[in-house]
Amino acid sequence: MDCIEFAKEYITSKGFKIEDENENIIAFKYQMHVLHVWKNESDERFACIALTNFTDITPENKPLIKEICNEINTNIKQAKLYVMDETIMATAEMYFRDQEDFNFQTEIALRNLMGAKIQFKKLERLTTGE
């Protein structure tokens, strides 16, 4: 089994809704967000979970958004935030041995991704006053 098959098993066991899938990516609904699990072609035991587009990026706020991402990246070790053009992406990467380990690692990754988003929104409000 590869990470997409492990992800499908995890998602269905938790009762989450699969939004879209192909052989390399599966999207599912979690806490009112759509997250994506990406398969790494060269490593069957590696997965990346991503949460994207949870803030608006403009040319004016892009430097501030990058600063906030850098601060979060130093404090939340598994989740990493990136600005790519006009899109923000939070990712959690993980290695796993089997389905049980995949499930365990995914639970941690989901908590870290949601925590990173919450922390991002707090810092964004503090720095912009909104």
Image (cartoon, rainbow, N blue to C red):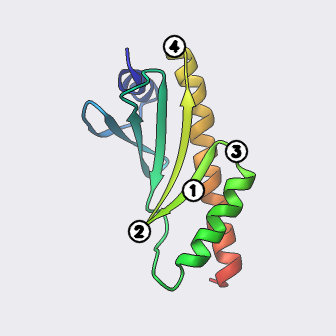
Please identify the quadrant where the C terminus is shown.
bottom right
Q: Residues within 10 Å of mark 2 (few under 14, many from 20)?
A: few
Q: Amino acid at mark 1?
A: Leu
Q: Which residue is mark 3?
A: 77
Q: Quadrant of residue 121?
A: bottom right
Q: Residue at x 59, y 69 (%)?
A: 66
Q: Amino acid at mark 3?
A: Lys
Q: Residue at x 40, y 31 (%)?
A: 40
Q: Sequence order check: which comes first, mark 2 or mark 4?
A: 2
- The residue mark sitting in front, 1 or 2, is 2
How far apart, in angstroms, are the residues tagged by discs 3 and 4? 23 Å
Q: Which residue is mark 1?
A: 81
Q: Residues within 10 Å of mark 4 (few under 14, many from 20)?
A: some
Cβ–Cβ under 8 Å for marks 2 and 4: no
Q: Residues within 10 Å of mark 3 (few under 14, many from 20)?
A: few
Q: Amino acid at mark 2?
A: Asp
Numbered tag placed on residue 30 in the rendering:
none
Q: Residue at x 44, y 24 (%)?
A: 43
On the picture, is 50 further left or further right than 119? left
Cβ–Cβ under 8 Å for marks 1 and 3: no
Q: Secondary structure at mark 1?
A: strand
Q: Is residue 53 above or below residue 16?
A: below
Residue 27 at x, y percent in the picture: 35, 41
How far apart, in angstroms, are the residues tagged by discs 2 and 4? 36 Å
Q: Sequence order check: which comes first, mark 4 or mark 1?
A: 1
Q: Residues within 10 Å of mark 1 (few under 14, many from 20)?
A: many
Q: Residue most toward the right? A: 75
How far apart, in angstroms, are the residues tagged by discs 3 and 2? 23 Å
Q: Which residue is mark 4?
A: 98
